[in-house]
Image (cartoon, helix red, strand yellow):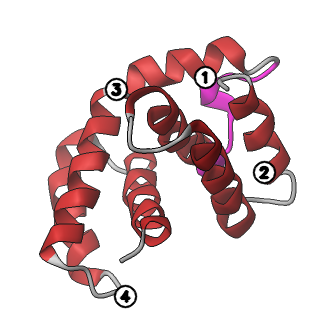
């Protein structure tokens, strides 16, 4: 799987935390990989799981950072797709040395185009620009 596909899989898995209790997530992760429509190698599954875990571990810290720059918006009022994309991108910008800032922003905008609403790409880009 390429980096873009891996990022999309991380996004899809991370999106599940919005609809499931924390104690249900191990089962959700298992189901995610069992029901995945794409063939996921063991290496890719490990990458997706590890990145997911690292983001979840920093979720509160990431949300605080988003709230600090999102003028007129708080994470509890944002659309769940946009919020999940922002969490992934902010993690990549701040904590993932393998991902250049410009790539993290560009990929987040692409995810917003694919999964978000009409205004999602510009909303995501506007918030992430403040991190750059």
Q: Which residue is mark 1?
A: 66
Tell me the SS state at disc 1: helix
Tell me the SS state at disc 3: loop
Q: Is residue 80 magenta?
A: yes
Residue 7 disc label: none
Task: Give the mark nearer the N terminus: 1 vs 3.
Answer: 3
> Is disc 2 surrounded by few (<14), some (14 to 19) or many (20+) residues within 10 Å?
many
Tell me the SS state at disc 2: helix
Marks 2 and 4, Cα distance to the nearest angstrom?
Answer: 25 Å
Q: Is residue 47 above or below residue 78?
A: below
The residue lying toward the viewer, choosing from 81 and 24, is 81
Task: Give the mark nearer the N terminus: 3 vs 4.
Answer: 4
> Is disc 3 surrounded by few (<14), some (14 to 19) or many (20+) residues within 10 Å?
few
Marks 2 and 1, Cα distance to the nearest angstrom?
Answer: 15 Å
Q: Position of residue 96 (x, y in %)?
A: 38, 36
Task: Give the mark nearer the N terminus: 3 vs 2.
Answer: 3
Marks 1 and 3, Cα distance to the nearest angstrom?
Answer: 12 Å
Q: Which residues are magenta?
A: 72-82
Q: Is residue 55 magenta?
A: no
What's the residue at 61%, 27% (across, down)?
75
Task: Give the mark nearer the N terminus: 2 vs 1.
Answer: 1
Image quarter where the C terminus lies is top right
Q: Which residue is mark 2?
A: 120
Task: Give the mark nearer the N terminus: 2 vs 4.
Answer: 4
Q: Which residue is mark 4?
A: 37
């Amino acid at each position: 799987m390429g980096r873009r596909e891996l990022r999309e899989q991380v996004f899809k898995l991370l999106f599940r935390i919005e609809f499931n209790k924390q104690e249900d997530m191990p089962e959700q992760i298992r189901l995610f990989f069992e029901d995945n429509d794409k063939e996921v190698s063991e290496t890719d599954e490990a990458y997706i799981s590890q990145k997911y875990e690292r983001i979840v571990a920093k979720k509160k810290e990431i949300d605080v950072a988003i709230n600090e720059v999102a003028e007129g918006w708080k994470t509890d009022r944002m659309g769940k797709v946009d919020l999940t994309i922002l969490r992934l991108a902010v993690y990549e910008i701040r904590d993932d040395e393998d991902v250049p800032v410009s790539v993290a922003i560009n990929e987040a905008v692409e995810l917003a185009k694919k999964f978000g609403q009409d205004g999602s790409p510009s909303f995501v880009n506007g918030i992430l620009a403040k991190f750059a």
